[in-house]
Image (cartoon, rainbow, N blue to C red):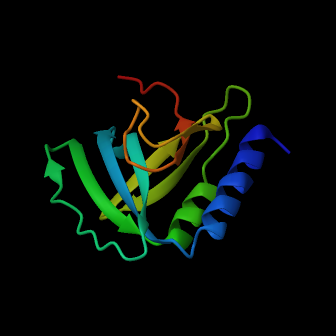
Amino acid sequence: MSDHQSLIEEVIRKIESRKGSYGSILVKSVIMERGGVWKNIVTKILPLHFSDIYLPKKKLDYGNFVMLEDAFSLDRLIEIIKNLPEKVGSEVVSSTIIIQDYQVQVEGEKLYDGCNYYSGTDYLDVGWFFERYHYRSPKLAS
């Protein structure tokens, strides 16, 4: 089993074990249209406490560049994570994720190990412990 697949399973286990605390997740994305295809530039995923009600902000649409937010169920997040492609050799691998009305092509290499942050760290002072994982995509061609 690859590191990518092992990390995917680890993240899914953590999400499943915390379903009693999380109600949904907030997705904040920046996407860009290139050659008629919407590509993910950067996306941040934040779990929301089950008692939190969050209404996504209005999208900022600049034509071929869009900044938007959406709220997903934990089950939908798990399906998205399961479908994150892993780069094999020099082959560019992609999958499609639906965010609002956009079919966003995600190209990537693999999921990278998480970092633990504690309350009050300079990186992101959120007041509680959190874990960060990242999924790196190849550089977008012009």
Q: Residue shown at 15%/59% (left/top)?
A: 58
Give the side of residue 66 with respect to residue 11, left or right.
Answer: left
Vertical placement of residue 78 versus 114, above or below: below
Residue most toward the right? 1
Is residue 49 something one can see in this rendering? yes
- Taking depth in this image into account, of 92 and 110 the one nearest to the observer is 110
Number of numbered discs: 0
Side of 107 where 50 appears, left or right: left
Viewer-nearest residue: 65 or 69: 69
Residue 124 appears in which quarter of the rendering? top left
Measuring 67% from the left and 35% from the top, which residue is drawn there?
87
Q: Is residue 107 above or below residue 8?
A: above
Residue at horizontal 32 percent and vertical 44 percent from the top: 31
Q: Quadrant of the N terminus?
A: top right
In the figure, is residue 45 to the left or right of 75? left
Q: Residue 141 appears in which quarter of the rendering?
A: top left
Of the pair 79 and 22, the residue shown nearer to us: 22
**95 relative to 43 in the view: left or right:** right
Q: Quadrant of residue 91?
A: top right
Q: Tell me, yes or no, if residue 40 can be seen here.
A: no
- Quarter holding the C terminus is top left
